[in-house]
């Protein structure tokens, strides 16, 4: 057993209102620079929809993530070393700008300098942020937002590709929901394995996946290998960039920008301890539906004396071990088992998990004339909503409908129990027995999901000053830490010097 620590995130989708505040604040913090106009480290998608970039979940097209070979061994879907070497100068599996979108700005000078006596109302026309020419806006990173569930968008969703037209129509009449996405900072990251220059790496102390800008040579194999398409290329520098999990803030014990500014308070951040020696075996299980249990088995119980002793022997500090004990991530994933990973069938073992949405099920329960606070009515509705459960299962459980139904039943039982206890003051033990909870478990889960304070949602231990020198050496190339960043000087860029250079703090 080789104990390591990983910073992870859980998002409660019932609370996401699609306001895109997380996306905007992330954009202003990390990608408000030349060369990354089209890049969104954090984006919010509307499901069903095609996502950003369009159709990123179609791995038959993009060949991202891992698969098993004939001998049951892991290999990249993008091919072995020889195939990747053969296509290193002409990668066929790269999304184009049309798959993302062409970023635009507006010619506001037209509004200011238009003649006062002009008979025409001045208009700020859109101009391409790439070419500077006039353009027509036809797509964007959140284009699905107003069209989610519509035939124009839903029919192109890769998760609905195996469903017949009748199923699609039934699903469109059921519900849609918002899905915030960041880099998954996987335990088994395909991007790291695919990088020919070893510029992509996973930090030892907290598992955050970063890019060494000095080592990056712009081969773009990381973009192809990432099945979530959360690695981008800066078109000014030709180097890869990605979500950093706001590591300077994490090192200071602060939450990520997207989490701290989240209006719905749906994000949870904390530590988990895991057995690094068990990762490969867990990612190699044959049946994709067994991957969820396999990944959960990799996580270690921070209250187990044997695990604690092994963590200490591995050099994990006491306050980090204590943070793992108090971690909301551990509770949601392991104790209550209501959080699920996104597309675990990619075999990257993602570390951003989701609590699937229950609210649409309650809406349908009400529409059927039933009581959305009655667990039996909700349970029957969940069981009858085969189509949306299949869709949720395609996202969060490799198609295993029973897993998603079990989580939704736990959430429904929690709401029913809290309402009954509040109104009548009693406990329906039979209801709790159905989901395997005690009254104390349900009330703890309710506090965590509904009314948790900031210190309960974010349990992040600060980095240790005694490790600062070593961590600084690891981070020396993973950030744009000189003015304008590597390769972004006036002499080396096509568009001149960067007006808003990104500066990254060193650990203090």
Image (cartoon, rainbow, N blue to C red):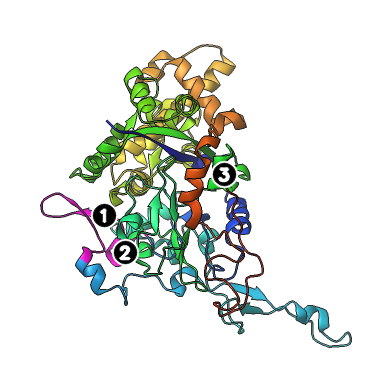
**Mark 1 = which residue?**
66
* Residue at the (30%, 52%) spot, across then down: 346
Image quadrant holding the N terminus, namely: top left
Q: Secondary structure at mark 3?
A: loop
Q: Position of residue 419 (x, y in %)?
A: 55, 22
Q: Position of residue 449 (x, y in %)?
A: 53, 31
* Residue at the (24%, 43%) spot, across then down: 280
Image quadrant holding the C terminus, namely: top right
Count the numbered circles shown. 3
Q: Earlier in the sequence, mark 1 or mark 2?
A: 1
Residue 367 visible, this angle: no
**Mark 3 = which residue?**
507
Residue 446 visible, this angle: yes
Q: What is the CA distance from the residue labelled 1 to the residue labelled 3?
A: 34 Å
**Above or below, 436 relative to 473:** above
Pick the front one: 331 or 415: 331
- In front of the other: label 1 or label 2? 2
- In front of the other: label 1 or label 3? 3
Q: Position of residue 73 (x, y in %)?
A: 16, 50
Label 2: how many Cα within 10 Å (few below 14, some 14–19, many 20+): some
Instruction: Determine whether label 1 and label 2 are within 8 Å by CB.
Output: no
Q: What is the CA distance from the residue labelled 1 to the residue labelled 2?
A: 17 Å
Label of residue 196 in the image: 2
Q: Is residue 68 magenta?
A: yes
Q: Going by the picture, which residue comes out furthest to the right?
A: 117
Please identify the quarter of the rendering in which residue 83 is found: bottom left
Label 1: how many Cα within 10 Å (few below 14, some 14–19, many 20+): many
């Amino acid at each position: 057993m080789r104990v390591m620590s990983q910073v992870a995130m859980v998002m409660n989708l019932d609370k996401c209102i699609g306001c895109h505040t997380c996306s905007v604040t992330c954009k202003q913090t990390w990608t408000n620079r030349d060369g990354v106009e089209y890049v969104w480290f954090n984006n919010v998608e509307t499901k069903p929809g095609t996502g950003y970039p369009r159709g990123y979940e179609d791995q038959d097209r993009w060949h991202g993530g891992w698969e098993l070979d004939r001998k049951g061994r892991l290999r990249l879907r993008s091919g072995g070393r020889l195939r990747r070497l053969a296509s290193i100068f002409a990668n066929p599996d790269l999304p184009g700008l049309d798959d993302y979108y062409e970023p635009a700005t507006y010619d506001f000078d037209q509004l200011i300098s238009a003649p006062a006596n002009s008979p025409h109302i001045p208009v700020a026309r859109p101009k391409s942020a790439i070419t500077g020419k006039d353009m027509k806006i036809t797509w964007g990173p959140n284009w699905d937002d107003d069209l989610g569930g519509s035939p124009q968008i839903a029919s192109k969703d890769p998760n609905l590709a195996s469903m017949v037209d009748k199923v699609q129509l039934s699903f469109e009449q059921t519900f849609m929901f918002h899905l915030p996405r960041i880099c998954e900072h996987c335990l088994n990251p395909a991007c790291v394995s695919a990088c020919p220059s070893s510029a992509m790496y996973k930090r030892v102390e907290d598992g955050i996946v970063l890019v060494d800008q000095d080592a990056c040579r712009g081969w773009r194999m990381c973009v192809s290998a990432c099945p979530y398409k959360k690695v981008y290329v800066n078109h000014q520098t030709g180097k890869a960039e990605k979500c950093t999990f706001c590591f300077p803030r994490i090192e200071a014990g602060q939450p990520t920008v997207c989490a701290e500014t989240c209006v719905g308070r749906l994000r949870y951040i904390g530590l988990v301890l895991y057995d690094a020696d068990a990762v490969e075996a867990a990612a190699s299980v044959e049946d994709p539906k067994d991957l969820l249990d396999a990944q959960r088995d990799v996580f270690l119980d921070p209250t187990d004396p044997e695990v604690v002793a092994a963590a200490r022997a591995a050099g994990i500090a006491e306050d980090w071990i204590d943070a793992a004990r108090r971690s909301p991530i551990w509770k949601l994933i392991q104790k209550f088992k209501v959080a699920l990973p996104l597309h675990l069938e990619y075999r990257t073992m993602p570390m951003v998990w989701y609590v699937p949405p229950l609210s649409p099920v309650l809406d349908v329960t009400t529409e059927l004339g039933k009581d959305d606070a009655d667990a039996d009515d909700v349970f029957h509705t969940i069981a009858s909503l085969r189509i949306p459960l299949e869709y949720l299962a395609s996202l969060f459980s490799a198609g295993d409908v029973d897993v998603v139904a079990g989580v939704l039943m736990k959430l429904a039982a929690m709401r029913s129990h809290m309402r009954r206890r509040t109104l009548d003051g009693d406990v329906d033990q039979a209801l709790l027995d159905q989901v395997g909870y005690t009254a104390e478990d349900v009330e703890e889960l309710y506090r965590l999901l509904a009314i948790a304070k900031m210190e309960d949602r974010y349990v992040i231990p600060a980095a240790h000053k005694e490790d600062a020198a070593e961590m600084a050496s690891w981070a020396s190339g993973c950030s744009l830490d000189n003015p304008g960043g590597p390769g972004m000087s006036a002499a080396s860029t096509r568009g001149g010097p960067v007006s808003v250079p990104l500066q990254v703090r060193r650990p203090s």
